[in-house]
Image (cartoon, helix red, strand yellow):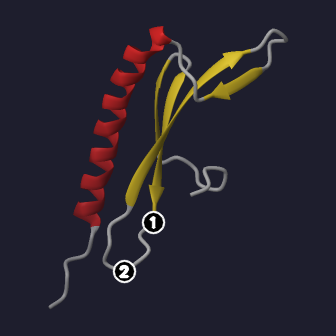
Amino acid sequence: MSDTNNKPVQEVRDGGLRIAIFRNEPKQEGDRPRYSGKLTRSYRDAQGDWHDTEYLSGTEFLRAARLMEQAYDAELAQRSADKNEAPEPTA
């Protein structure tokens, strides 16, 4: 999956930490969508320009873990909504 062409369906944030949640459409009819996430940390360099990295400092581990819980809850809600919107199977 390429994140550059796929916009996140939801984001959860805590300061400079962010998890973007992406919806991946099913490859076969009847399958449900799958979700994936990407954790990034934003920071400014010495020139004041913003950048993203996947690396965290040790002091950010707990914040990231709590953010992961929020992302899991958001993804679970998305899956539940998908299940409720899915058409009933025909016999």
Q: State the residue position of label 2.
A: 29
Pointer 1 local density, CA inside 10 Å: few below 14, some 14–19, many at least 20: few
Pointer 2 local density, CA inside 10 Å: few below 14, some 14–19, many at least 20: few
What's the residue at 63%, 22% (across, down)? 42
Indicate the position of residue 38 as horizontal and vertical percent values.
51, 39
In this view of the protein, which residue sits in the foreground, 65 or 90? Answer: 65
In this view of the protein, which residue sits in the foreground, 25 or 65? Answer: 65
In what quadrant of the picture does the C terminus appear?
bottom left
Indicate the position of residue 29 as horizontal and vertical percent values.
37, 80
Indicate the position of residue 86 as horizontal and vertical percent values.
27, 70
What's the residue at 33%, 40% (across, down)? 74
Q: Are marks 2 and 1 in contact (CB under 8 Å)?
A: no
How far, Cα to Cα, is label 2 from label 1?
10 Å
Indicate the position of residue 15 as horizontal and vertical percent values.
52, 16
Circle 1 SS class: loop
In this view of the protein, which residue sits in the foreground, 46 or 84? Answer: 46
In this view, the residue farthest toward the bottom is 91
Q: State the residue position of label 1.
A: 25
Query: What amino acid type should be assigned to the residue bearing mark 1?
Result: Glu
What's the residue at 53%, 13% (across, down)? 57
In what quadrant of the picture does the N terminus appear?
bottom right
Circle 2 SS class: loop
